[in-house]
Amino acid sequence: MINVRTAREISIMKDACRISANALCVAGEYVKPGVSTFEIDRKVREYIEKQGAKPSFLGYGGFPASACISLNNVVIHGIPSKEQILKEGDIVSVDVGAFYNGFHGDNAYTFACGKVSEKAQDLMDATRISLEKGIEAALANNRIGDIGNAVQTYAEARGYSVVRDFVGHGVGAKLHEDPSVPNFGRAGRGARLLPGMTIAIEPMICEGSYEVEVLEDEWTTVTVDGKLAAHYENSIAITPDGPVILTVPG
Ligand code: MG
């Protein structure tokens, strides 16, 4: 069932989304050579809890941390660790959510650690813009397939591939709600977008093949070919006046 929320509910949800966005900014401040991913996760958790919110991911399906931190060939769901120390040139995808006043916010961003290669920067730029294209397509009366098609068309035109095995989702009272929001697909297909739907659009874009595998820890998801991947995400609301990004820092 796809939830449709009132303007009042969406305005309450904005607080959770703002906290999530600020938490992502906190993470970004600590992305530098020599910092462990454990340390970044700790700062994120401290920030979220200080706001009276809860980290959405902590304990979700048994996930052991507040943020997923995924380096280089890790696409998503990287587990922060004291042993994992950031190096100059790493690309660092951080995915974080916060639960506050009955709603979740969910967002992700791929940060550059120091100076990164031109190819890494190009992948990050393309992925970020593919998210913007997806959001632009999230118009009332469009369909879910219009979003995925916009992301895929842009990413593939830049020479990249779109992960198939993981997708975006509805977000609200639960972290993951209906509908699934693939980052690929055919325009004009899938559920119709209605004002009041709140969804997380989150392209995961690969330098090489889109094939991914989950490691033995049952979380860490890597590209099979070992090439780079990037990941950006916003929680948005469909409104009569167009898509509104909810995960805005402030
Ligand atoms: Mg998400």
Image (spheres, rainbow, N blue to C red):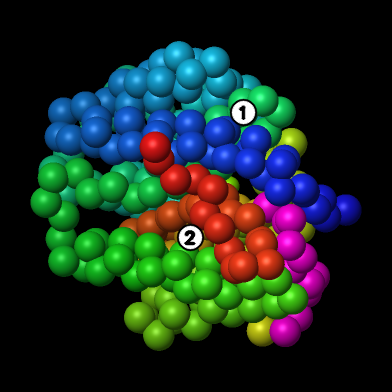
Q: Is residue 246 left or right of residue 157?
A: right
In the rendered view, tell whether residue 126 sits above or below residue 46.
below
Q: Is residue 197 left or right of residue 227?
A: right
Displayed quadrant of residue 105: top right
Mark 2 neighbour density, 10 Å: few (under 14) some (14–19) many (20 or more): many
**Looking at the picture, how far across and down is residue 106, in whole percent?**
55, 42
Prevalent SS, magenta region? loop
Residue extent of the magenta highlight: 188-198
**Looking at the picture, how far across and down is residue 26, in whole percent?**
32, 31
**Looking at the picture, how far across and down is residue 181, in whole percent?**
66, 62
**Residue 193 shown in magenta:** yes
**Residue 102 shown in magenta:** no
SS for dot 2: strand
* Amino acid at pointer 1: Phe
Q: Say which label, 1 or 2, has the lower sequence index.
A: 1
Residue at position x 57%, y 33% in the image: 16
In the rendered view, tell whether residue 154 sits above or below residue 19.
below
Mark 1 neighbour density, 10 Å: few (under 14) some (14–19) many (20 or more): many
Pick the front one: 132 or 246: 246
In the rendered view, tell whether residue 123 sits above or below residue 111.
below
* Amino acid at pointer 2: Met
Q: Which residue is mark 2?
A: 204
Asked whether the viewer can see residue 142, the reply is: yes
Front label number (1 vs 2): 1
SS for dot 1: strand
Residue at position x 72%, y 84% in the image: 188
Q: Which residue is mark 1?
A: 99
Residue at mark 1 to residue at mark 2: CA–CA distance:
23 Å
